[in-house]
Image: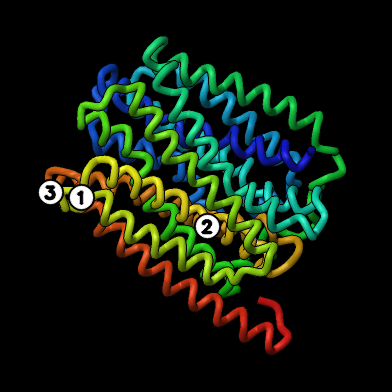
Amino acid sequence: MSAHVVILAGVCAALHVGKLAPAIAALQASLGLTLLQAGFLLSLVQAAGMLGGLALGAFSDRLGGRRSVLLGLGVLTAASVVGGLSQTVPVLMALRVLEGFGFLLVALPAPGLVRALVPSDKLPAMLGLWGAYMPLGTALVLLLGPLVIEALGWQPWWWLLGVVTGLMALWFARAVPAEVGRAGSRRLSDGLRSTVSSLGPWLVALMFACYSSQWLAVIGFLPTIYTQAGIAPALTGVLTALAAAVNIVGNIMSGRLLQQGAAPRSLLWQGFVTMAVTSVLAFADLDQPPAVRYGAVLLFSAVGGLIPGTLFSMALRVAPAEGAVAATVGWVQQWSSAGQFLGPPLAAALASRVGGWQFTWVFTLAVSGLGVMLAGWLADRLQAQVAAGSDP
């Protein structure tokens, strides 16, 4: 049960990453938000991870996973409550950066906590479940956000999520034993140096960037795309929430397939190739019926979910030392955040330049191709090291 509470804490943190997407229209009306500013607001929550994921991961190893999660939930609570009081875009942007720090303090130590709380034979499946924390949190806010915002406004939406996060912190403190995730004894510099000097963490991190940049760019702008198409806000929320939620299927399946002996390279290739093909079907100007386009978006998210679940398992495997697990996850998160930071503004800039979203597939095809190459490289390296009897 404690491991499930850790996962729920991650879901709660993910609520704050995704809470902006359903509020974009309301923010445009109340604060004069532009489309480009909306792209940066979507991605600014990733600035902390992009600039300091590795350092925060090493700090989390040193602080102790349990205390790190509690601190992160506290930061998210405070930032969301204060954010509901903001009246300008710059203030909201600054608070999004602060929320990024809180999110990382929760997300980085979580895989290590899960590993400490479950038997080793159940770890791949549980990590696959952990990999679903982001799409589950995103789906919840995309489903509930439009209803709350339409009824009460965007500011009460911020306050509500702050209260929920505060309650989650209390539950986590009671459910996760104090002896789990104690502070480490390694110096911060040791974790930093061993992580960045190993090739395995680099390959896993870059693949996560290839995945996260396109997933957030597509899912994050779906409410805007559907609103521009004249779809009612309530239906827009349902369609977008479903597109985010089906990503959970891929994450859970990746854990089960890995536990049954599936090759990580095969799962990663399936994920990246499917995202490339379905993005063409979803966005290219090929006169597809709306149902075909939406079905392609669902497949983009669902099969793409094989990627993060697989990469979380790989991150633990390529960690250079037991005391550098959170640092390795932090390095992976740093590149994942870089992808999420750059993806939405790039997609928005491309759409603004060509006057629509019809060339979004060019961006997703490029990063998927890079992901396929990196997956092959990592698999070859791991096979060579296993044959030589050395660690990744």
Q: Is residue 4 left or right of residue 337?
A: right
Q: Relative to 387, is 144 on the left or the right?
A: left
- Residue type at tag 3: Val
**Residue depicted at x 53% and y 71%:** 265
| Amino acid type of the residue that numbered disc 1 sits on in the rendered structure | Leu
Give residue 54's quadrant in the image.
bottom right
**Residue labelled with disc 3:** 354
Which of the two labelled residues, at mark 2 and mark 3, occupies the earlier sequence position? 2
**Residue at position x 28%, y 46% in the image:** 292
Q: Residue drawn at (87%, 43%), measured in percent from left and top?
A: 179
Compute the Cα span from label 1 to label 2: 27 Å
For the C terminus, the image quarter is bottom right
Residue matched to label 1: 350
How packed mark 1 is, by other alpha carbons closer than 10 Å (few <14, some 14-19, many 20 or more), is some
Residue 365, position as x, y percentages in the image: 30, 62
Q: Is residue 384 above or below residue 263?
A: below
Quadrant location of residue 188? bottom right
Q: Nearer the viewer, mark 2 or mark 3?
A: 2
* Occupied quadrant, residue 241: top left
Which circle's residue, 1 or 2, is located before the other in the chain? 2
Circle 2: residue type: Leu
Neighbor class of circle 3 (other Cα within 10 Å; few <14, some 14-19, many 20+) is few
Whether residue 98 is visible to the viewer of this picture, yes or no, is no
Q: Secondary structure at mark 1?
A: helix
Mark 3 vs mark 1, CA separation in Å: 6 Å
**Element at badge 3?**
helix
